[in-house]
Image: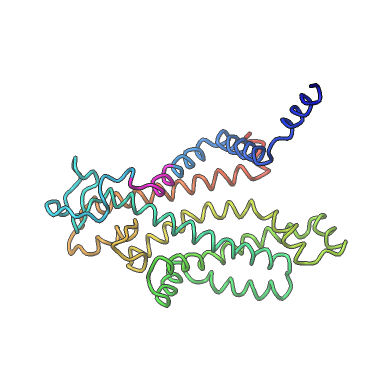
Amino acid sequence: MLGSDTSEESAQKKENPLINLCRSWASSFWRFIRSSPIGAFGVFLLILLGIIGLAPGLFAPYDPDKIFFDSLKTPPDSEHWAGTDFLARDSLSRIFYGARITLIVAIISIFIGDVLGFIWGVATGYLGKKFDLISQRILDMFIAFPTIILALLILAALGAGLFTIIAAIALIRIPSTARVIRSVALSVKETQFVEAASAIGASELRVMFRHVAPQCFAPLLIVASAGLGSAIFTEAALSFLGMGVPPPTPTWGNMLGGVLNELFQPPWWLVIFPGVAITLTVLAFNLFGDALRDYLDPRLRGRLD
């Protein structure tokens, strides 16, 4: 009897590692929320946007492609809270459904671009010498182009569409991410534990990805969180210029681009409401990125706590 009680106590002490990991993440998230009310507001907006993007049908009053023949370009009223567009479609419903495509483009493009930029930055920072010199000249060449112009050149070559705009935004993300990660890798390369790993005979590939790369994850998270807002703005600008996701698929950018069909002054609600959606989303990512940077910076963590 005593042995069974002891075994139960030992089993309780040896909890599932997954449970411990979830508790650790929850504790870190709660400390982050307490340390930055502004960052918490950004997280709240991002959670709300994520829910809307995952289930826009729960919020949209109508189908985004439904045409109301008796309500062509009507201003906001009790039936259409954000008015209707030049094809008599409910603007609010299209804003909700447009959140899904806009967020998909931003998240996938930033993930691809920042992962490739991370690998490139770690490699150039650690290997150095001629590889670093050649890589820096290539990065300088890409950074010299304005991002919108470079994205337009890529889309002109590949054609407009969902996958091509993701590829274009991902490609223009690589140079800036690689430059930031390279600077971090250069400083990590000079630390004692990296020199010790090299001294005991570890290969360059092992040292680079086992010892240097993990120290660059925190800057990568900060760069990615800030880049998501930039990606949303870039997608909106490209769609506004007619080089993004083609209609009738709703995105906030092509909703703004629809006002170009107006010969005279466009209805104000077709500009204001998609613009507010873009502004709030970019603001949320920027607030979250700034708060995350302060939280992960060892020089500021004590002050924030």
Residue positioned most to the top: 1
Residue 190 against residue 55 in the figure, above or below: below
- Residue at 47%, 65% (x, y): give it: 169
Question: Which of the 4 image quadrants contains residue 105?
Answer: bottom left
Q: Is residue 251 left or right of residue 232?
A: left
Considering the image in quadrants, where does the N terminus appear? top right
- Residue at 51%, 40% (x, y): give it: 39
Question: Looking at this view, is 138 or 156 the one in front?
Answer: 156
Residue positioned most to the right: 200
Q: Is residue 9 left or right of residue 305?
A: right
Q: Main secondary structure of the magenta part?
A: helix
User: Does 88 lie within the magenta span?
Assistant: no
- Residue at 19%, 40% (x, y): give it: 78
Question: Which of the 4 image quadrants contains residue 120?
Answer: bottom right
Q: Is residue 171 left or right of residue 71?
A: right
Residue 276 against residue 201 in the figure, above or below: above
Where in the figure is residue 302, as x and y percent of width and height? 67, 36
What range is drawn magenta here?
Answer: 48-57
Where in the figure is residue 187, as x and y percent of width and height? 73, 58
Considering the image in quadrants, where does the C terminus appear? top right
Residue 26 against residue 98 in the figure, above or below: above
Residue positioned most to the bottom: 157
